[in-house]
Image (tube, rainbow, N blue to C red):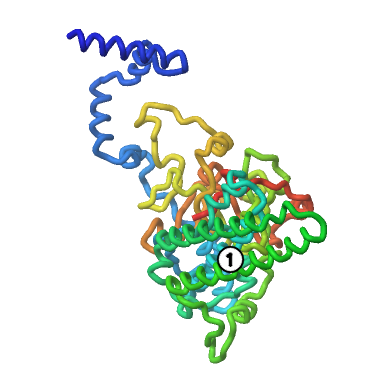
Amino acid sequence: MKKLLAFIGATLLCMAAFAQNGGITPSMLEQISKGWAGTPADKALRNAVAQTPINTLAVNAENAAMIGTDFSDRVQTKGITDQKSSGRCWLFSGLNVLRAAAIQKWDLGNFQFSQNYCFFWDQLEKANLFLQAIIDTRDKPQDDREVDWLFSNPIGDGGTFTGVANLVTKYGLVPSDVMPETAVANSTSQMRTHLATLLRQDGLKLRGIAAEAGVTSLKGAKAKKAAAALQERLQHEKTAMLAEVYHILALCLGVPPTEFEWKGRTVTPVQFYNELLGYDLEGGYVMLMNDPTREYGKVYEIQYDRHMYDGQNWVYVNLPLERIKEMAVASIKADVAMYFSCDVGKFLDRSRGVADLRNYDYGSLLGVDFTMDKRERIITHASGSSHAMTLIAVDLKDGKPVKWMVENSWGASSGYQGNIIMTDEWFDQYMFRLVVEKRFVPADVLAMLKQEPVMLPAWDPMFLPEE
């Protein structure tokens, strides 16, 4: 008994000590524990929640009926793609935009471009981007924020539409049957892990070579000569490292074709793209963003948010939702699909393929109020752009959108016939990025793009690659 009392006394003393530093005191714990009343209703809910996923219990029965599936305006597309267990939504969405244009122009039927072909070059280019960035930052300390970010993010399979534009412009396209998917392309995590480990190892080697050279301690002509020699050596090492990356990619994804047969003749991937579509991907589109944490009407650029060292960073103009919707409607009415990204997991009923703020009533189930608006969710990391899809439809009532539809890349059996229908209210809260052809962009918005972009750091929470 004495030991028990001593233990209780020691515990109370410890709690009192913690309280002086902001810890939980006995009296505070007494107040906190009142959050559980232990009523029969509480116990019944506790029993249910302990055995059932929260989303299942939070389903709003009053909103269970399937939303209307008719749309006043819809882009004509054919076939649903499937990224499977990979983070390539950005690539599927971007190529689906091009696919819709190609199908309409050439009446190709259920045609697909090879995502695997573009993904091969994406991974090689990202490896070069990382290694060259390590060379460029070799004089900075290892714990520098930029260097640390590079080693934290050496390579991944997520991305943006800018990456699609750069890759297709440089390497062209091939049909899906020319370079089909592989098991690794469909499930990229293991390859990504091994490539990341190899690149981190290579990055340390490059920094070690630079440190041993001691160029920064030299002066004058000797410094210039030594710097040139070091740069040449680092480029030689980088090339050898990229050869190893290429070897891994060839094993996992296959060797990209340099030419193939198309309609009775031999073409290169670049010729194929130029003849099939051939418009300016890098300069023909405008990236739009709705980010209420930053000033509207301004242009922003994200450091390292690109797929190629010599490619383009993601550059966007930040606009109110009403302006973005105007351009989206104009594009759909012209039968042109768009690259679109959002925070897809919020209030999404996957079985019906409906994103609606009324799908789930978490507050009633858990007994709390969730009150943050879009801006507050962004600054607290509670929401951000997580998934890219292809915007293909809008339903207008009296000229105003009431719902939208995107073509997804989770297979034909997911959602509503492979698509997701979004209410306009959901669109307002969780839509972030849209890529629109310049012909649908008003003159005043085009004029905004003449501004010098505000550079944002690579680690900004709004600009993680879409998966």
Find numbered disc 1 in the image and state the secondary structure of the residue it sits on. Answer: helix
User: Looking at the picture, how far across and down is residue 66, in whole percent?
Assistant: 38, 50
- Please state if 64 lies on the left or on the right of 447 as rendered: left
Rendering quarter of residue 1: top left
User: Looking at the picture, how far across and down is residue 225, in whole percent?
Assistant: 76, 64
- Please state if 330 lies on the left or on the right of 99 as rendered: right
**Which residue is found at the position 28% from the left and 35% from the top?**
49
Residue 332 seen in the current view: no
Rendering quarter of residue 347: top left
Closer-to-camera residue (428/2): 2
User: Looking at the picture, how far across and down is residue 154, in whole percent?
Assistant: 54, 56
Residue 421 seen in the current view: yes
Residue that mark 1 sits on: 125
- Please state if 63 lies on the left or on the right of 122 as rendered: left
Q: Amino acid at mark 1?
A: Glu
**Which residue is found at the position 36% from the left and 44% from the top?**
64
**Which residue is found at the position 62% from the left and 81% from the top?**
271
Is the residue 432 above or below the residue 263 in the image? above
